[in-house]
């Protein structure tokens, strides 16, 4: 094992472990600001450190500090304390581990060796994801049951029934996908989607399998217990459902687990249906051979985008009434300077790529970084869809939820399998 | 070396889980120890490089079936007072151990008499989805279909039984 091997190993595991954790902050911020946007209000934007509010991101720090220093109560009536403590850990851990097999860039070839860009270089792919999504139910069941509380038990019952029933349409939607892709390995699936249909449409799962995409996304919403499927929590009827007895960090871990699950399933949706890390029309091979033109194009685009972005920051980050020495203008100036500093660093790095040997290791690493950025961008968009749906649609009634799962999605998924198989057999 | 340590870890865990299933009084504890056994069995399959079986064990047994079992236990809401008093429980267990001991020693003898064959890693394609699928649908097609018909019969039977009960009321 050379030094490079060890570095790549650590880097991949660190990426798979820490990026979901960092995205918790982004998700919470997007959720709260997004809710504010959809409900025509500002959302959290007051918490600050020395006047720097970071568009509301500082609120996350305040929330975290609050939850961290709250009293951690385990009520006296709870008999099975072990399960009570274990439940949030299971929810969080299974969500985090299910992301480990998602490839975040194409296989990196360095010095004749290839590195699969996944947290765990397993080729089980979807099967691994399905198994860990299934494990997540244990956390919810144990939490609701060990709370010894009618709201908790009701929430856990609903959630378990919901997750178990929606696993079936999800699995069947995946079956029709597997018929098209011919593999369960997520990296191969992402590579498949780099090709072009009829020479000009990217062969994304969304194009080839639109019905499976709809079914899978609905089932993924149900599996992550997000609105319109958040009957497990249902504030208006069950107080908080399965986590009603939890406080402080144990509650926070449930909360974080939900966002990690959202991140992981967004990553899965992106990988299965939206080309994964692929940049549309630019396959990995093209990118590596054309690294210099791409880098040059980025050198031009980034400052232009930043110019408009900083202009927007300058215009919107002001007080709504006249103030002497408006502190928000000062704040905006500092942000803009930081952003331009970032742009300068990026430009220097891109310039280095322009002067490197073409097709060498630098080009390979550059392409990997580009693909990682594309992947994270796609995931962020998908997370936005989650938030969008949450603040737009009302909650289902319980019988509607089961009806949708068993009478709509299941037959549709079965039909989709038959149609897809007929097409694949006829075309091959 | 690492694989050996993993093997012992999983083996000990699976046996402990099975013992827990038998010895715990509360059904939830029993079910959770069975989950531990299922997961360690999956680990043992992975060590045998049976990748597909590993995933299926996790999805089907450790995931779906056991969560249904937990679901039912939660539904029944069993309190300590609902559990039957098991008199002479230890006597039964002692008797069970006495019956099992000769069989176990016989099995250990058999395992020891197996000539020490060197463990070699089979080809990287072994146990993958494609390989198992090919074997299943080429060499074992008829047994596979018969088993699926058996499952279908069980499914129809469950529906019929559930329907009958409602009619009676």
Image (cartoon, grey):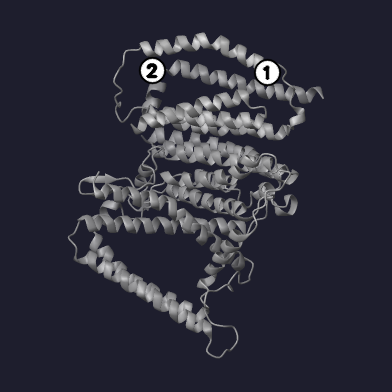
The chain carrying label 1 is B
Q: Is residue A276 visible?
A: no
Residues indicated by labels 2 and 1 sit on the same polypeptide chain? yes
Q: Is residue A6 left or right of residue B74?
A: left
Residue plotted at (73% across, 44% down) = A77
Mark seen at residue B89: 1
Tag nearer the camera, 2 or 1: 1
Q: Is A254 drawn above or below residue A404 in the view shown?
A: below
Q: Which residue is mark 2?
A: B139
- Chain ID of residue with mark 2: B
Residue A137 is labelled as none
Horizontal side of residue A164 vs A131, given as left or right:
right
Q: Earlier along the polypeptide chain: callout 2 or callout 1?
A: 1
Image location of residue B160, percent across then percent down = 69, 22
Give how far apart the Cα atoms at labels 2 and 1 are. 48 Å
Label 2 Cα neighbours within 10 Å, binned few <14 / some 14-19 / many ≥20: few
């Amino acid at each position: 094992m050379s030094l490079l091997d060890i570095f790549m190993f650590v880097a991949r595991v660190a990426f798979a472990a820490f990026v979901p954790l960092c995205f918790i902050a982004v998700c919470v911020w997007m959720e709260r600001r997004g809710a504010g946007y959809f409900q025509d209000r500002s959302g959290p934007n007051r918490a600050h450190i020395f006047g720097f509010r970071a568009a509301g991101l500082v609120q996350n720090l305040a929330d975290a500090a609050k939850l961290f220093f709250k009293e951690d109560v385990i009520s006296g009536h709870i008999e099975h304390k072990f399960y009570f403590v274990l439940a949030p850990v299971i929810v969080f851990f299974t969500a985090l581990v299910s992301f480990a097999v998602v490839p975040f860039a194409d296989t990196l070839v360095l010095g004749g060796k290839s590195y699969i860009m996944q947290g765990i270089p397993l080729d089980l792919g979807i099967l691994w994801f399905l198994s860990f999504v299934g494990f997540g139910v244990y956390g919810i069941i144990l939490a609701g049951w060990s709370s010894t509380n009618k709201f908790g038990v009701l929430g856990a019952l609903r959630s378990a029934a919901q997750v178990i029933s929606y696993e079936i349409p999800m699995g069947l939607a995946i079956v029709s996908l597997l018929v098209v892709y011919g593999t369960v390995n997520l990296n191969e699936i992402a590579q498949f989607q780099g090709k072009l249909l009829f020479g000009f449409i990217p062969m994304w799962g969304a194009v080839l399998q639109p019905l499976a995409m709809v079914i899978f996304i609905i089932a993924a919403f149900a599996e992550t217990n997000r609105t319109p499927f958040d009957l497990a929590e249902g504030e208006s009827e069950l107080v908080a459902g399965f986590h009603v007895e939890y406080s402080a960090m144990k509650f926070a871990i449930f909360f974080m687990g939900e966002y990690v699950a959202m991140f992981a399933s967004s990553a899965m949706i992106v990988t299965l249906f939206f080309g994964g890390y692929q940049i549309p029309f630019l396959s990995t091979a093209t990118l590596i051979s054309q690294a210099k033109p791409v880098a040059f194009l980025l050198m031009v685009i980034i400052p232009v985008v930043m110019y408009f972005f900083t202009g927007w920051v300058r215009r919107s980050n002001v007080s709504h009434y006249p103030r002497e020495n408006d502190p928000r203008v000062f704040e905006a100036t500092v942000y803009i300077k930081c952003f331009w500093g970032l742009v300068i660093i990026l430009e220097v790095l891109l310039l280095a790529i322009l002067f490197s040997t073409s097709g060498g290791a630098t080009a390979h690493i550059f392409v990997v970084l580009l693909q990682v950025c594309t992947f994270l961008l796609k995931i962020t968009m998908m997370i936005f869809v989650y938030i969008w749906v949450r603040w737009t649609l009302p909650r289902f009634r319980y019988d509607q939820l089961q009806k949708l799962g068993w009478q709509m999605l299941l037959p549709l998924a079965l039909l989709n399998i038959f149609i897809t198989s007929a097409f694949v057999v006829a075309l091959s | 070396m690492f694989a050996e340590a993993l093997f012992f870890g999983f083996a000990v865990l699976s046996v402990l889980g099975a013992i827990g299933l038998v010895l715990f009084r509360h059904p939830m504890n029993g079910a959770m120890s069975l989950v531990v056994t299922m997961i360690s069995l999956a680990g043992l399959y992975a060590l045998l490089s049976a990748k597909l079986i590993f995933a299926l064990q996790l999805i089907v047994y450790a995931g779906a079936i056991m969560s249904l079992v937990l679901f039912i236990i939660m539904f029944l809401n069993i309190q300590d007072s609902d559990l039957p008093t098991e008199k002479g429980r230890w006597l039964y267990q002692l008797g069970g151990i006495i019956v099992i001991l000769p069989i176990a020693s016989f099995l250990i003898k058999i395992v020891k008499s197996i000539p020490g064959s060197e463990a070699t890693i089979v080809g990287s394609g072994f146990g993958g989805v494609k390989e198992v699928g090919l074997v299943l649908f080429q060499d074992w097609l008829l047994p596979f279909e018969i088993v699926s018909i058996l499952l279908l019969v069980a499914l129809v039977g469950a529906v019929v039984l559930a329907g009958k009960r409602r009619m009676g009321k």
